[in-house]
Image (cartoon, rainbow, N blue to C red):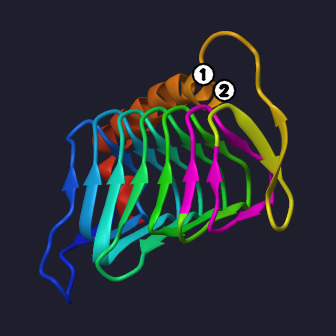
Amino acid sequence: MPLIMPSPLTGKKPQIHDSVYLAPNVVIIGDVQIEEGCNIWFGVLIRGDVGTIKIGKNTSIQDNTTIHTAKGTTTIIGENCIISHHCMIHGPTEISYGCLVGIASRVLQNSKLGEGCIVGEGALLRNKEIPPNSYIVGIPAEKKSDLTEPGKPLGAVYADMYVENGQIYKEFFEKNLNYYKL
């Protein structure tokens, strides 16, 4: 079963919408707000023990990602985002609507991603504001190009798929509670 607990430091409790899929080994602590349709995958740690973490509707936080924020600050991940496997999100920071943060990337203190940005795999972003619809790569992360494709941002396109996958997993575990005890 997921470990969901108040912060021992502030006493604040997570607020998680009933529709959210939480993998069995997720840990969520403190002042964390997770909106409807989100899916939080295996091995994720979301630690709002000293600050606030807000995750918008239909966002996917994937396997082994860690999200934390500095004392008294807020980390915001917008709606319809994909935070890929093994990412580190450490605030204060803001990731806007429809962003896709690539595998093993780090989005760190005082960074802001505009809507529809893509962060390339393994990138390291810190102390920068990135304009909407930018593709950034590297260590330190730099803007490589503009994303000019019409339509939904890539994060939002994939978010729809993960909302569906999350609901399938949620239903499976609800019907097969004994799997939590293996």
Measured along the vertical axis of the image, is residue 177 above or below residue 87?
A: above
Is residue 124 within the magenta segment? yes
Question: Label 1 amino acid?
Answer: Val
Please give the name of the residue rendered at 30% of the width and 38% of the height, measured from the top-left corner.
175
Mark 1: secondary structure: helix
At label 2, counting other C-alpha atoms closer than 10 Å, the crowd grade (few under 14, some 14-19, many 20 or more) is: many
Instruction: Look at the picture and state if 134 lies above or below 68.
Output: above
Element type at marker 2?
helix
Q: Taking the image as drawn, is residue 1 in sight?
A: no
Is residue 52 found inside the magenta-colored segment of the image? no
Residue 158 in the image: state x and y as whole percent: 61, 27
Give the answer, above or below, for where 58 lies relative to 25: above
Residue 72 visible to the viewer: yes
Q: Residue at (73%, 37%) from the top-left corner?
A: 134
The disc placed on residue 157 is: 1
Who is closer to the viewer here, 91 or 29?
A: 91
In the picture of the structure, the residue carrying the numbered disc 2 is 154
Task: State the quadrant of the C terminus.
Answer: bottom left
Residue 173 lies, in percent from the top left, at 36, 44
For the point 47% across and 53% down, the residue is 94
Instruction: Count every numbered label the image shows and give the total.
Output: 2
- Can you tell which mark lies on residue 3? none
Q: Are marks 2 and 1 in contact (CB under 8 Å)?
A: yes
Magenta-highlighted residues? 111-130
* Cα–Cα gap, marks 2 and 1: 5 Å
Q: Is residue 115 left or right of residue 34?
A: right
| Three-letter amino acid code of the residue under disc 2 | Leu
Which image quarter is the N terminus in?
A: bottom left
Q: Residue 168: x, y in percent?
A: 44, 30
